[in-house]
Amino acid sequence: METEPTEPPGSPTGVPGRPPTIDVEIQDATGRLDRSTLGWFERHVVDAAGVLGCSGGVRVRVVGDAEMRVAHAKHLGEDSTTDVLTFDLREAGGGASRGGDGAMPLDVDVLVCLDEADRQARERGHPASHELLLYVVHAMLHCLGHDDHDEASFAAMHAREDEVLCAIGVGTVYGATERAGGGS
């Protein structure tokens, strides 16, 4: 469903007076998220894409540990579950350059694990829906060229995630571990 995001003041909009459009689809393969939570999740993915100045499409499939473990093994050779897998479907060489409307184009499939989100949310002290949203923002940032493979880029990427989540009214999610005195 194509929606025009309502953006916080000062966020990028591509063309003045016209926010970028983003097509967001959420599929709950676990059957554990209620309609209200799914609606909240979809609206906030749209808002996050707006803050990032993105247009295009984001498709999210919410799975459990078993399905994530299979996908993790198939795509990355790891026989374990994980929080998020990102599949950037833009044509090779498309990169993170702005489209004609000034927006950063996205065409991404995202697999997020509700079981891992439940575990992390309990540790960080917030709802699993916030953790799932963090995973999708993380995936979008990867598609926009962010990396988290060394200490400095890891810190910068997670700080940017929390900036986006604060801008859309969710608040700090990843950094909640530090506030609670934990670590990740």
Image (tube, rainbow, N blue to C red):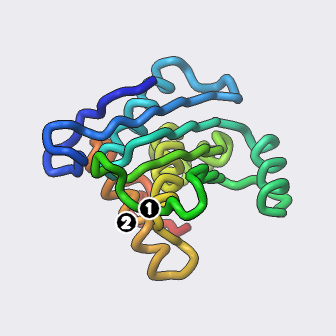
Mark 1 lies on a secondary structure that is loop
Residue depicted at x 63% and y 51%: 87
The x, y position of residue 40, in whole percent, is 42, 28
Residue depicted at x 36% and y 45%: 48
The x, y position of residue 57, in whole percent, is 49, 39
Question: Could you tell me the amino acid type at mark 2?
Answer: Ala
Residue depicted at x 52% and y 69%: 183
Tell me, for residue 156, which label it has, or none: none
Image quarter in which the C terminus is found: bottom right
Q: Nearer the viewer, residue 135 or 101?
A: 101
Q: Nearer the viewer, residue 26 or 66?
A: 26
* Residue 78 visible in the snapshot: yes
**128 up-or-down from 148: above or below:** above
User: Tag 2 or tag 1, which sits nearer the N-term?
Assistant: 1
Which residue position is annotated with label 2? 159
| View extreme (top): residue | 35
**114 up-or-down from 100: above or below:** above
Which residue position is annotated with label 1? 96
Badge 1 density bin: few <14, some 14–19, many ≥20, Cα 10 Å: some
Q: Nearer the viewer, residue 7 or 19?
A: 19
Q: Quadrant of residue 56?
A: top left
Image quarter in which the N terminus is found: top left
Mark 2 lies on a secondary structure that is helix
In the displayed structure, does residue 135 sit left or right of residue 157?
A: right
